Each structure stands twice: as structure tokens, then as C-alpha cells.
Amino acid sequence: MTETTRAADGTADPSVDVAAEGARIAASISRVVQGKPHVVRLALVVLLAEGHLLIEDVPGVGKTTLAKALAASVDASVRRIQFTPDLLPSDVTGVAVYDQETREFEFKPGAVFANIVVADEINRASPKTQSALLECMEERQVTVDGVSYELARPFLVMATQNPLEMEGTYPLPEAQRDRFTARVSMGYPDPAAELAMLDDRATADPLAGLRPVADAALVRSLVEAVGRLHVSEAVRRYVVSLVEATRRSPDLRLGASPRAGLQLLRAARASAALDGRDHVLPDDVQALAVPVLAHRLLLGSEAAVGRRSTEQVVAQLLASVPVPRGR
């Protein structure tokens, strides 16, 4: 596989087929996560956009399974962190330990030093431990005792989160949510998919049978190919208009940050590449606006009393902001 994704001089191969390779990874994940093609696609979009994914839903609907299936489909280093109230920040990032033989401090890497980090039930840990991921997710590095350590690429955090009304949960701070490229809810499977699940998992775990269909080098090549996709000025202005509209909305007390616009455009590039196009359309932006923007926004008091959701507000803004024509 590596030979097909690297040029003779060792650089990324510009001719890599993002749509074909993405379809192979998606098909592998779908062997385990059945009946959820839109969820699988969003996970793949986030991976190719060099972002991070927040999976939020009630227990037992496959949040961790999705994260594990993606990890098993990519031959890269994977670490899983079970977030609990007693988890310490050093368990996540690592710690400097004094070596009596050398009389020097030696850095012991934490669980975050991997290509794919599965942060299970992230909102069961204390805010102090949650904040240990802030630098990792944004700058892709860890700083301990004034020394910075680079993280490997690709680097993807897939975090699962239980609804806040459940016992023993801590809400993610705004800065933490803003670092997740997108949020997705798994939802319950349809009856046909649930029936197939009962048959397939009666005697074996389908995760055990997954074999990697990509490696870290291929993913890096796909990411570089996605970054080269053409985005017209009209589409860029459309992204800015959507982000600005959230800041002006009377239904919101906190709109989208500039980071949100950057990640929306990166996700739109990845979506276009997975569709086999070399340019981004307004349709790509519209399709991703809700999962990329909604989790970053805070409702105003009137909207909250009216039981409106941030997803509904974003959908309303999509209907009101003029859509550019053409590419």
C-alpha cells in the first residue's frame, strides 16, 4: 500500500485517489457500524480534515464501536483512554520522572501519544483532566515542564460523551468543544440493522475480524490531497457569511469562532474529495454546517426557554444566508 501512496523521492503521491481510498475505509467501518452511512462518512471527513470528532449519545448505541472500527481500519498507533473522575492530566499527556542513575528527568509519554486516540466518556473526567487535551488537539504537541513534544501525524481524537443529564458527568467547557471539528449523534439503528446485528454478533465480535485497509502514510497522503482542493472566493465568502450570521443571531449568546470557519472549510474540502471532485461546492458547506457549527454555539435565554436547539438555529441560518452560484 505504501508503494502506491509515496512517490519515488519519498514525498506524498499527488495522484492518490481520495474517493477510492475513502470508500475502502468507509466500507471497512460499515462492516461493524451498520445502517449508519452518514455517521461513518462524517468520521472519515473529520479524519481527512485533520480534525477531531465528538460522538454524543446515550450508552449502548455504538459510540465506542465507531471509534474502534475506524482505528482498526487504519494501520496506525491507537490508544484508548477511559475517562473517569480519578483520571489525572499526567495520565493523558505524560510525566517527567527522575532517573536516579542518570540524575536527569526522563519523559514518560502518556496515552495521547498515538495517531488515533479514543477518549471514552470524556465528560466523566474532571474539567482539569479534560483541559489536558486542549494543547494536544489544537497544536498537536504536549508541553511538560517547559519542554514541548510533537505528536505523530495523523492525529485524531475521537471522544465519546454521554448526555449531560446522566449521573457523574461534567459539561465540556466552550474551549474544549470548539476544538472538536464536528459532533455527531449515533441514534438508534433501524429495525433491519438491529436484526442483522443480533445475527452477526451472536457468536463473534465483528471488530475482531477487521483488518487495516490503510496506513498512516496513506492517510497523510489523503490529507495533503484534500488540502490542495480548489475553493473559490465565492465559497470562502459563503463560509464567512454563515459564521458571521451565528454571531448576529438573536437566538444565540455565543456565536461561532474563527476556528469554526476554518474547520468548516477543511471539512467541506474533505467531503468534496470523497465525492471525487477537485473543487468545493456550496452544497458541501451546507451539508456540514450543522455538525461542524452547532456544538460550538450557546443558546440565548429566550431560545432556551422555547426549547430550541442549536441545530435548529443553524438550519434557520442556512435558509437565510444567500447561497453563491456556480463553483
Image: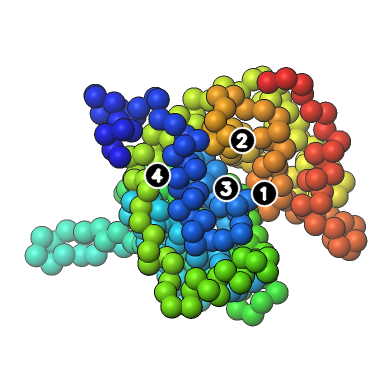
Amino acid type at circle 1 is Pro
Instruction: Identify residue for label 2.
Output: 268
Q: Residue at point 64% right, 80% down?
A: 167
Q: CA distance from mark 1 to mark 4?
A: 21 Å
**Element type where label 3 sits in the image:** helix
Instruction: Identify residue for label 3.
Output: 41
Q: CA distance from mark 2 to mark 1?
A: 12 Å
Q: Earlier in the sequence, mark 3 or mark 1?
A: 3
Amino acid type at circle 2 is Ala
**Image marks 2 and 3: residues in contact by CB distance under 8 Å:** no
Label 1 Cα neighbours within 10 Å, binned few <14 / some 14-19 / many ≥20: many
Label 2 Cα neighbours within 10 Å, binned few <14 / some 14-19 / many ≥20: many
**Element type where label 2 sits in the image:** helix
Which label number is shown at residue 79?
none
Say which of marks 2 and 3 sits in front: 3
In the rendered image, residue 136, in percent from the top left (x then y), is placed at: 44, 51
Amino acid type at circle 4 is Pro
Q: Residue furthest left?
A: 101
Q: Quadrant of residue 21?
A: top left
Q: Earlier in the sequence, mark 2 or mark 1?
A: 2
**Image marks 3 and 1: residues in contact by CB distance under 8 Å:** no
Q: CA distance from mark 4 to mark 3?
A: 18 Å
Q: Quadrant of residue 286?
A: top right
Q: CA distance from mark 2 to mark 4?
A: 19 Å
Instruction: Identify residue for label 1.
Output: 291
**Horizontal arrangement in the rendering, residue 3 relative to residue 156 (left or right):** left
Instruction: Identify residue for label 4.
Output: 154
